Amino acid sequence: MTIDNIHGPAKAALDSLAKGQVAFLQSLPKAELHAHLNGSIPISTLEELAREYIASSGSKFSSGDMLETIENFKAGVKLEKIADFFSLFPVIYTLTSNPDALRRATRAVLNRFLDGDEPQCTYLELRTGPRKTDKMSREEYIRAVLDEVERYDEDRAGLIITLDRPTGPDNWKEILDIALKLKREGRRVLGVDLAGDPLKADVEDFRAFFAQAKEASLGVTLHIAETPDNSSEETLKLLSYQPDRLGHATFLDEKAIKIVTEENTPIEICLSSNLLCKTATDLETHHIRQYLRCDHPVAICTDDTLPFRTNLLAEYALLLAAPPLGLGLSEDEVRKVAEMSMNSRLKVLLKQ
Ligand code: IMP
Ligand code: ZN
């Protein structure tokens, strides 16, 4: 825990727990199913990459800007609205724009989740949207990440490939084609994801891509209803693509909740992410409660540990801590939630 730069609501919840409660959380088998690679890079790795970047020539960002951004990540980025969140990535992307840096970042992320004295989880589905840079193609990007993921057994780690909403159909097609090709090669591509700025793109444009992914037995997980500005019509359209899991699902209306409940579609819940991006006001009214009440499958996840300064243990602490710091669940209830996460792994869902 000491190695992670954690802060904010999850840290407060974790600090409120007795030693035995922390040990209990630590001992639970847990699956992290919603972690974005470039949003999960440990701060020490980012600093290392930044130092090398600054020492190299031809920098896009001045060293002052770069260092200031890293200091902001350490001190805590200010997020007034969800749009502020997406502006954080250009600096990170500059630091992971060649295969070597990307491999190192991926290795550090996998290590932080899966290894050490206090591993965050038993199983990790890492996700990332491949970027083409002047140093690598999208396919080289994914191959570099997969090489790192596949250093772990398949019961420990797998990859989800993200289609980024703002980038457009030509890019989505190229990315899906790479995902299908790598899956055919037997590489550990488990599924595809829809992510990126939730107010960009017409989701109708994704219909054929997700149908193709499902046909090839890839899992499909969708960031859905992330903001109040995502329309009910959009949400219903996304649900009609029959996703295997949903990310956030914060603003589902009754019709959508009925479909999700009937389909028993697991929801990836990212408590700190929602609180810090201000898409949830507090834990008392957080949408996780309605799913817990009816035993609907949820998976507790971190989303982006770097900007949200959290880790998976601290997200679980938000379940166990007494209100107002946490939801005040019992240990048995938390154990059940952890089991739900393990049962929501794509490889489990796709076998059903
Ligand atoms: P990457 O795919 O490894 O580059 O991870 C970072 C990217 O994930 C960001 O640029 C966003 O597009 C996306 N992302 C991270 N968190 C969220 C989220 O909560 N909602 C939508 N997109 C997200
Ligand atoms: Zn996300």
Image (spheres, rainbow, N blue to C red):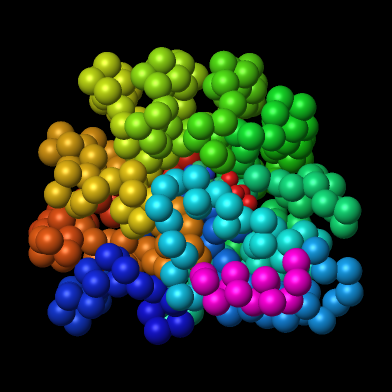
Query: Seen in the image, is 98 located left or right of residue 265?
Result: right
Q: Which residues are magenta?
A: 61-73
Q: Is residue 69 magenta?
A: yes
Residue at x-position 22% and y-position 45%: 286
* For residue 272, above or below residue 229: below
Q: Quadrant of residue 290?
A: top left
| Nearest the eye: 226 or 299 | 226
Residue at x-position 36% and y-position 56%: 276
Residue at x-position 55% and y-position 35%: 194
Inspect this view and state whether residue 266 appears. Answer: no
Query: Seen in the image, is 264 located left or right of residue 106?
Result: left
Residue at x-position 39% and y-position 73%: 6
Q: Quadrant of residue 296?
A: top left
Q: Position of residue 323 (x, y in %)?
A: 10, 61
Looking at the figure, which quarter contains the N terminus? Answer: bottom left
| Nearest the eye: 302 or 134 | 134
Q: Main secondary structure of the magenta part?
A: helix
Q: Position of residue 71 (x, y in %)?
A: 55, 76
| Nearest the eye: 307 or 184 | 307
Inspect this view and state whether residue 203 appears. Answer: yes
Q: Position of residue 119 (x, y in %)?
A: 43, 72
Looking at the figure, which quarter contains the C terminus? Answer: top left
Query: Seen in the image, is 92 located left or right of residue 97?
Result: left
